[in-house]
Image (cartoon, coloured by chain):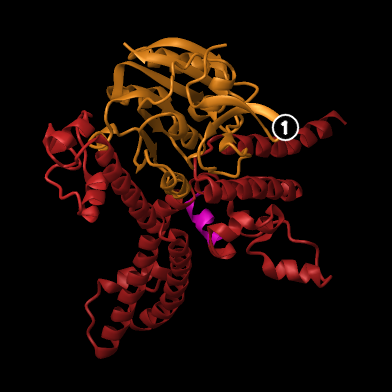
Amino acid sequence: MTDDAWFAGLDPADRETAAGRIREGGADSPADWPAMAVETGFAADEGDYYDCLREATIDAARAAVEEREGAVDQQLVHAVRAMDDCRRQANELAERVAEWGSSRFESGGTGVEYARELTERDPETLGDRRAVSLARRVVALDEEADALKEYVETTTPEVAPNLAALAGPVLAARLLSLAGGLESLAKKPSGTVQVLGAEDALFAHLRGDAPSPKHGIIYTHDAVRGTRPDDRGSAARALAGKLSIAARIDHYSGDRRPELEAELDDRIATIQARAADDTEAGDDE
Amino acid sequence: MSDLPAGVARRDIDGETGLATQGPPAYGEPTDEAGWRRWNPRRSKLGAMLASGMDTGLTGGETALYLGAAAGTTVSHVADFAGPTYAVEFAPRPVRDLLDVAEERDRLFPLLKDARKPETYAHVVEPVDAIVQDVATRGQAEVALANREFLREDGRLLMAVKARSEDVTADPEVVFDAVVETLSEGYEILERARLEPYHADHLGVVARPR
């Protein structure tokens, strides 16, 4: 029983180990720890025990928070940018490999898939060896992009649970990347979130050369893409509004609000129903 | 109207009468010269349960386990009138604020733990007189059942059930009935009441272990 206690065999002055025990330890069931601590001589009396416990729990919680938070949103920003870079470079190099490969080997192909095929060949000449080696780099880059994507998919829900649930982890990470982090995304008005990623179009509009963009990167979300072009502005506005709220909850409070998804679905369904209404009205005429 | 626990009082602060406890201010709430600070029932489900006259069985000075402490708004008041208070919260972001609240109090122990896994904090938390639960996850009744081992035989569970955490589309009453039914597997329900007008779609439950 006593062995389970966080203070079992602990030197009361050893704050670091104490905090580690609070974080990593465990027990099947609770017990009267304060009394046990006094019995075993860990603490002089109950008050002394609670003083030790207070220090240990505060140290443990602070360390755990720092570790789990540690500006993970910035890491995500780097990861999603690196993912896009790897993918783009892989595709670009794959074109080179395809051009080179088709000049040397009979079966021509395209893209990363072709590079993958090439890696299985036995190079005969020095030139072949270089071509196959380059193909391996392409495949490795593409695999790195996959690994980065996996990292983004598991980490985004921890950093921004509501945003990730609403936007999907990859789009959520892209929004964080465009805004420069969770805090700055949380502080942006929803109209800005709506056109993040459409900066060229936005500035063209501000110069007076073009209509205002209806959506930026959030175009990739089903709520926008799945809506007919006439109503995409409305859908993008509704989506951006909910995404801004989600980012603010994630930054300022951190708890999970599943109702946001339901509200968004509801709103998008209403917007998409306009298309059906118009068709019906057309039939009546 | 049942009695308030010792250490909680209705006070006139800033020209408004409402619940208050004595302690260092935690989140910018109004205070008076005597050291009392407003406990806003709109920001706290336990506050709403007390304000609406539910019989919580709290007398003041008891040991408490608080599940879902979040940034520590409610738990700061609990630590003001209760004895040693263990505050469990799973999300790192709010725990940063909870730490500030804990730093200013002698008997508030913050734990960054998952309330669904009591075995990860049973080596720290002692048996308590009261469990206060306000977690916004699905399976709120299961959380209460899993943590029942911490409650003394004559202890009280004070629970706020958030309908929208269980099912956003279902009628809240239906959700509440289902949660209370599951809860009855391990608890005897003493009182249940909606927390309107303070909190929409929330149910307050007072129960004791069976």
Q: Which quarter of the rendering shows the C terminus of chain A?
A: top right
Q: Nearer the viewer, residue B83 or B50?
A: B83
Relative to the observer, which residue lies in front, B24 or A205?
A: B24
- Res A131 quadrant in image: bottom left
Q: Which residues are magenta?
A: A168-176
Residue furthest toward the bottom?
A126
Determine whether B17 is above or below A135 in the image. above
**Residue at position x 69%, y 59% from top?**
A192
Q: Nearer the viewer, residue A108 or B208?
A: B208
- Residue at (39%, 26%) from the top-left corner? B61
Dividing the image into 4 quarters, which one contains the N terminus of chain A?
top left
Where, by quadrant of the figure, is residue A262 drawn? top right
Magenta region, main secondary structure: helix
Q: Is residue A232 above or below residue A283?
A: below
Per the image, is A174 magenta? Answer: yes
In the image, the chain rendered in red is A
Q: Position of residue A26 (x, y in %)?
A: 21, 38
What residue is pinned by disc 1? B15
Q: Is residue A210 left or right of residue A269?
A: right
Output the letter for the chain in orange. B
Q: Position of residue A6 (x, y in %)?
A: 20, 41
For the point 40% across and 20% down, the residue is B157
In the image, B7 versus A55, the foreground residue is: B7
- In the drawing, does residue B160 fall left or right of residue A232? left
Give left or right: position of A208 versus B17: right
